[in-house]
Image (cartoon, grey):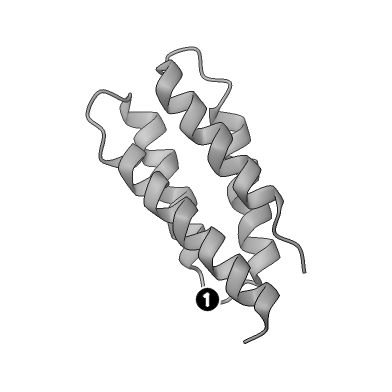
Amino acid sequence: MSKKQEEYAQKLSQAMAVLNRVAEDNTTPRNIRRTAKQASDILMDESLSIAAKAANAIDLLDEISQDPNMPMYTRTRIWNIISLLEGIRD
């Protein structure tokens, strides 16, 4: 595994950890928790390249980050995940 791939794998696991925290946070609306879980599942999909996983998760999270019902601290976490994933390229 190259240094770049190790760095990307680390970013993916950081993103998944935060997504799982959002998905388990009962103060966050259910639709947002469900989307966080879906994004986490995408990041674990072995059939996709690392960059494809990141891009798909970003699309999902970008859409949900506009939700007016999202608590501010959750929105900040989502933005942090997006910026973490944007650093992943093929």
Residue 73, compared with residue 4, is above or below; it is above
Q: Position of residue 34 (x, y in %)?
A: 37, 40
Residue at far right of view: 90
Q: Secondary structure at mark 1?
A: loop
Q: Nearer the viewer, residue 22 or 33?
A: 22
- Which residue is at a point 55% across and 69% down the rendered structure image? 9
Q: Can you say whether 80 is above or below 55 in the image?
A: above
Apparent side of residue 59 relative to residue 78 in the rendered image (left or right) = right
- Given residues 18 and 32, the one toward you in this image is 18
The correct choice, above or below, for 83 with respect to 54 in the image is above
Residue 77 x/y as whole percent: 47, 33
- The x, y position of residue 80, in whole percent, is 55, 37
Amino acid carrying label 1: it is: Glu
Q: Residue 53: which quarter of the image?
A: bottom right
- Location of mark 1 (residue): 46
Q: Residue at x 64, y 68 (%)?
A: 50
The answer to whether 12 is drawn above or below residue 82 in the figure is: below
Q: Residue furthest top?
A: 68
Residue drawn where x is 46% and y is 61% of the image:
13
Q: Quadrant of the N terminus?
A: bottom right
In this image, 3 relative to 20: left or right? right
